[in-house]
Image (cartoon, grey):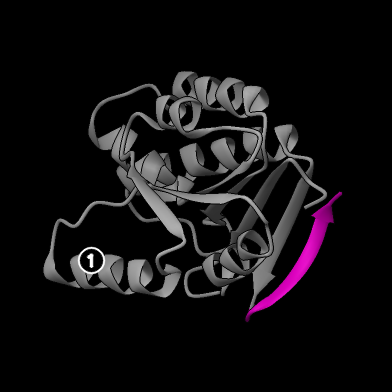
């Protein structure tokens, strides 16, 4: 794996998670999936179960809906690859909990820069659609976009996935 920090962006159902998993599974060391999503309803629970089954027994899963930087620090090692999915859900979780997204993102970037092994992060690009019609949705779009920009600036490689096709944007 050539990039130590690799951000993979894309729209909903674009294939970004599948692409990230394929890159990760080419790594020879241990695989750690850091999940930010929570099962608040039956549909999300089924989605989480399906993704966990798709990953298989080689993966260790760490749940970090809020304390992402801490989970990264605890799970990292030079022979471990971290796959963090997804930063967009994490941003939503932070906003729902009343956390400062910019400050928490700075902590995430500091943790990523200290990771001795590779890390792949997955996020939705939410700024390509229509302008949301309410203040909360606009605040979320803005926070997610600012977080994506900050992580992309820190990343060695950035890939955009559309219709299952990866396009290298950086690195």
Q: Quadrant of residue 45?
A: bottom left
Q: Quadrant of residue 154?
A: top right
Magenta stretch containing residue 138, yes or no? no
Drawn side of residue 67 relative to residue 130, left or right: left
In the image, the segment drawn in magenta is 163-171
- Residue 95, given in percent of the width and then of the height, sits at 31, 34
Residue shown at 48% from the left, 75% from the top: 13
Drawn side of residue 110 relative to residue 138, left or right: right
Residue shown at 41% from the left, 74% from the top: 54
Drawn side of residue 114 relative to residue 90, left or right: right
Residue shown at 47% from the left, 69% from the top: 12
Q: Which residue is mark 1?
A: 44
Is residue 8 depicted above or below 54 in this figure?
Answer: above
Dominant secondary structure, magenta: strand
Residue shown at 32% from the left, 23% from the top: 99
Magenta stretch containing residue 170, yes or no? yes
Q: Quadrant of residue 155?
A: top right
């Amino acid at each position: 794996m050539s990039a130590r920090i690799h951000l993979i962006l894309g729209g909903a159902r674009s294939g970004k998670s599948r692409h990230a998993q394929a890159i990760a599974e080419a790594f020879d060391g241990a695989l750690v999936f850091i999940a930010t999503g929570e099962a608040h309803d039956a549909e999300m629970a089924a989605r989480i179960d399906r993704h966990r089954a798709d990953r298989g027994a080689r993966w260790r899963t760490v749940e970090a809906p809020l304390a992402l930087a801490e989970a990264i620090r605890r799970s990292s090692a030079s022979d471990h690859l971290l796959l963090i999915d997804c930063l967009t859900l994490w941003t939503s979780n932070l906003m729902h909990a009343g956390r400062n997204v910019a400050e928490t993102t700075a902590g995430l970037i500091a943790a990523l820069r200290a990771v001795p092994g590779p890390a792949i992060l997955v996020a939705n690009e939410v700024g390509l659609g229509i302008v949301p019609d309410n203040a909360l949705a606009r605040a979320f779009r803005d926070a997610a976009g600012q977080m994506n920009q900050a992580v992309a600036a820190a990343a060695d490689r950035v890939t955009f996935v559309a219709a299952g096709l990866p396009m290298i944007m950086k690195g």
